[in-house]
Image (tube, rainbow, N blue to C red):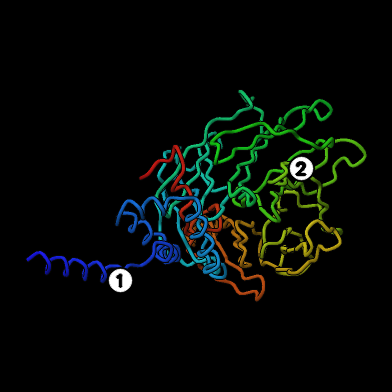
Amino acid sequence: MSPPNKTISSATTTRWRNNHIPSDIVLNILAKLPVKSVMRFRCVCKSWDSSITTPYFISTHLNNSYNKNHDNGYVIHMSNHYNRAVCTVALGRTFDRISEVQYPFDFTPGCAHVVGSCNGLLLCLADFGKVIYLWNPSIKKFKKLPGTCLGKLGWFTDRTVGFAYHSENNDYKVVRISCSYFVPTESRPLPEVEVYTLSLDSWRRVGYNLTTNVKFISHCCFLPIPLVSGALHWIVRIIEGEEENRIIALAFDVNSEKFKRLALPHGFIEADTLHRYLASFKEKLAFITREPIEQPGFPCQYSIWVMKKYGIVESWNKLFVIPFERKVQCLAFTEYGSLLVGHIYDPVERQRQQEAFKFVLVDIETPHEKKDPDIQCPSSVATFMESLILLDGPNVASY
């Protein structure tokens, strides 16, 4: 009986070899699947789980997802309502609801919002900015960032936070800038800057390399600090010297970790200080302003400028002008050209409508209005995509 058994065993082995798919082909197939499917396939065997959690696989999957969904991505908006503890994932062009996601971390109700998004990883501030989280809803993982490296900050300290992908090192950085206020201009210290690096899981102080002291203009809490051409961008006012009170853009290069000045468009109206924003539009730097206009029935308009060649002030071009029938505030501006604005009803309208706010989604290129974007109260909005980022990181919590 021995020879037959040997023959059967040999045939079985040959059949297995003929049907076996090489591991590199398997991983190539897995890297093109949705995140939920990839997470399920981690349970197949240890070798698949080990391969899926490598930085190389995570980056490959991210690139595949980006190429596939770049023209049809999502946004995620976090409600600032005290009784609403979920984020809504919606289509980037229409804000149509796709799903809702429960917050995984604890915070004071109404005191959390999204301040940045990179490759499916969200940066969230909680408890008036005292606590910072990185959160990937796609894989149900998050991590709480360590405390500041600047020591104890005073009560009269203003903070602004940006989030960036560092492509050269395939890493992620959080930039936090702290400035003293209620301090006389002549004695006001320069801004203090610290950078958190995800791969190191730590903060470090970074020097402020400019000699010009500036005041960071309070950024609309609903719009993330834009990342364009490898730099984060803020609107600031020069507070000393011959250029005192001049408004400019300040860029922080994520690679060199140096600041540089960028001029804003010539001719924009400076009167409305509270309604000027920087944003990203089709991977270019955009400057959004609200301006009063003398036209019956249209008290204000939004103008959208785009810097066609990064760093070249002459390349600023006013591409869109959108008049509104009442005063509105910009809440979001997406890569796809969707402008989300909201206004507060006056007391009579509020009683009739039984709600305090009205929101309108505008396609700036048509301009087509979507009257009901399924948002009931002010929300912080960020671009969103599924990814595996944080799957292989240390000190990460699952839920």
Q: Nearer the viewer, mark 2 or mark 1?
A: 1
- Residue 4 picture quarter: bottom left
**Which residue corresponds to mark 2?**
259
Q: Residues within 10 Å of mark 2 (few under 14, many from 20)?
A: some
Q: Position of residue 41 (x, y in %)?
A: 33, 58
Location of residue 45 with respect to 25 vertically, above or below: above
- Mark positioned earlier in the residue sequence (2 or 1): 1
Q: Position of residue 176 (x, y in %)?
A: 64, 38
Task: Tell me what residue is drawn at x 66 percent, y 53 percent.
Answer: 227
Mark 2: amino acid: Phe
Q: Secondary structure at mark 2?
A: strand
Q: Where's the C terminus, which quadrant? A: top left
Is residue 304 something one can see in this rendering? yes
Q: CA distance from mark 2 to mark 1?
A: 57 Å
Q: Relative to residue 250, is residue 170 drawn left or right? A: left
Task: Tell me what residue is drawn at x 72 percent, y 31 percent.
Answer: 181
Q: Position of residue 192 (x, y in %)?
A: 70, 32
Task: Tell me what residue is drawn at x 67 percent, y 33 percent.
Answer: 178
Location of residue 142 with respect to 187 vertically, above or below: below
Q: Secondary structure at mark 1?
A: helix
Q: Position of residue 153 (x, y in %)?
A: 63, 26
Q: Relative to residue 108, is residue 239 drawn left or right? A: right
**Which residue corresponds to mark 1?**
19
Q: Which mark is residue 176?
A: none
Mark 1: amino acid: Asn
